[in-house]
Amino acid sequence: MPQALSCAKASFQKRCPMRLSPEIRFLLTLLGFALATLGQASVASGSPSLPKATVESGELEGTYFGSDNEAAFLGVPYAAPPVGELRWKPPRPVSKWTGTREANQFGPAAPQLPSGWLPHVAWNEDCLYLNIWTAALSPNAKLPVIVFFHGGGNDVGYSQSTPLGPPLSRLGVVVVSVNYRLGPFGFFAHPALTAESEHHSSGNYGLLDQLLALRWVRDNISRFGGDSNRVTVMGQSAGALDITLLMASPLAAGLFEGAILESGEAQSTLNQDIRSPIPYNRISSTGEASGQKFVDDLGIAGGPDTLERLRSIPADKILAAWQQDREVKFGAIVDGWVVPEQPAKTFAEGKQLRIPVLVGSNADEATVFGLIAPKTVDEYKTYLERDTGRFADQEFAAYPVGSDAAIPEQFLKYHNDLFSYGAYSLARTMTHSGQNAYLYLFTYAEKGKRAKLGAYHGEELYFLSNTYPTDWDHDGDDERLGQAIRAYWVQFAKTGNPNSIGLPEWPAYDTRKDQYLELGRSVALRQVPERVQVLGQIMEKVVADATGSAAPVRSN
């Protein structure tokens, strides 16, 4: 169970036996529309007055995405290019420039393999750029800030994949989206890198990028109308998972005051360790062992010049080697520095950042994952045993199958519930830490050709961005739900509480009531299903057994 959750929540990491279905190609067809819209919004070169802002590294000239008050600054560097000697090192601050730098186009994506579900855009190892949207370009505006980290399993994705900036900034916040290193460039651990590091750590470079981006926001966002003391981080799938890792990291202290987590978190499961094998979670390797296997794939023998040779390999050759061996996994790890210990232990002991959270999942997350279910009952039991060890019988009792034919339905239900359980678990944990948690379940199923997929992974992003696929079968419920979701999210960023006049009441999660807010064709409070609660009880035992930490006391 834990590894399945980690894989799914990280947006298609390949630890689980999953393959992408054709339907997920629809997931971000809105991207082309978003890029075209932003391109059309760029003011012609002869315009007499483009928006400008001066940051610590120099002056920027942006563009407009609507009226003269609605400014966008795209492709803003927040770190030095992580190339050459800076490959696989913590990011460095960006160098100052002279003159005015144009900021009217998105920066390149991080190096990545084609995903099959995400439109391809140009990538470059020089990829550490962010984007800003604001409707109040004044240091006196003091607007709340939302910093968005995209999904994609920490393997693929880019900051412009979901056009959240225009619709959310028009509601009174400054919106920032961020590129960060991915795959073998962002999460490669190796003994030689560990030895080189003053922190005796390697891997997690993508998380270090996110941390530097947040420090950049702290130091510069006031120039765009933002309030550096009111920053909310927001992530979907792997982006949400990363945020919970940051919440467990001492390095993130003081960088954000709230978190919005959609379909992903890292505190209810176990994460790969840099050196120590873990008997749960379908974890078959350590961070450094995976890195060493990849070095072998690259044909580099050990020696004093190992890192020099690795850093001289062209980026496309690194991706080509990874393409040939997708059994090598690159993801965030417990490295002893950025992530000092298992996040499950940190959260269970209340040592994480204590901030309000808005957290939830979609009812039918896994319908687009192309899950390959075990073929026989014995294979199904073996799958569960590799996840939860001696607790697998309890998990089988929660998701029983009496025949081979019954496996696909239960396997899908189980993977859907892993997302629900993760959100539920985080809401419970934060509540036990004395912080408000607002728990939701997105249940909206569109009426067109994708209706059979239900409320699938990532669908809520259409409503947040107010941008839908061209073949979306619209009805009045779309607009009503979209307005409600955007209002809830923005109000949470403004106050730490999503409630405002005109919206159905959304109470903070209460362990005595076990309720969530359904966001669908109806918006109403519902009871957390019993099977999700049972899954939670099993997982708490697994985490406690693996980490030695007691789970939060369960209220009746």
Image: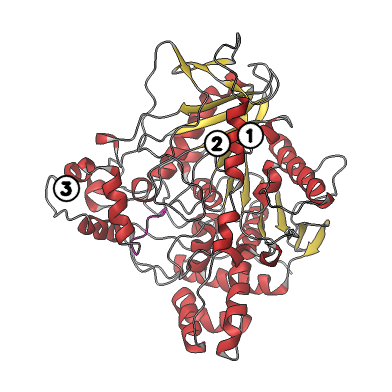
Is residue 405 or residue 424 the one in the foreground?
405
Local SS, label 1: helix
Q: Which residue is mark 2?
A: 177
Q: Earlier in the sequence, mark 1 or mark 3?
A: 1
Marks 1 & 2, CB-CB < 8 Å contact: yes
Percent coordinates x, y for residue 422 in the rendering: 60, 61
Q: Residue 144's quadrant in the figure?
A: top right
Visible in this render: residue 40?
yes
Q: In the displayed orientation, state which residue is furthest to the top.
A: 48
Q: Amino acid at mark 3?
A: Thr
Q: Earlier in the sequence, mark 1 or mark 2?
A: 1
Marks 1 & 3, CB-CB < 8 Å contact: no
Q: Residue 541's quadrant in the figure?
A: bottom right
Q: Which residues are magenta?
A: 327-332
Q: Nearer the viewer, mark 1 or mark 3?
A: 1
Is residue 197 shown above or below 80?
below
Percent coordinates x, y for residue 139 in the rendering: 63, 16
Q: Earlier in the sequence, mark 2 or mark 3?
A: 2
Q: Which residue is mark 3?
A: 306
Q: Amino acid at mark 1?
A: Gly
Give the alpha-carbon distance from disc 1 to disc 2, as whole Å.
8 Å
- Give me the residue at 30% from left, 46% from top: 316
Marks 2 & 3, CB-CB < 8 Å contact: no
Q: Amino acid at mark 2?
A: Ser
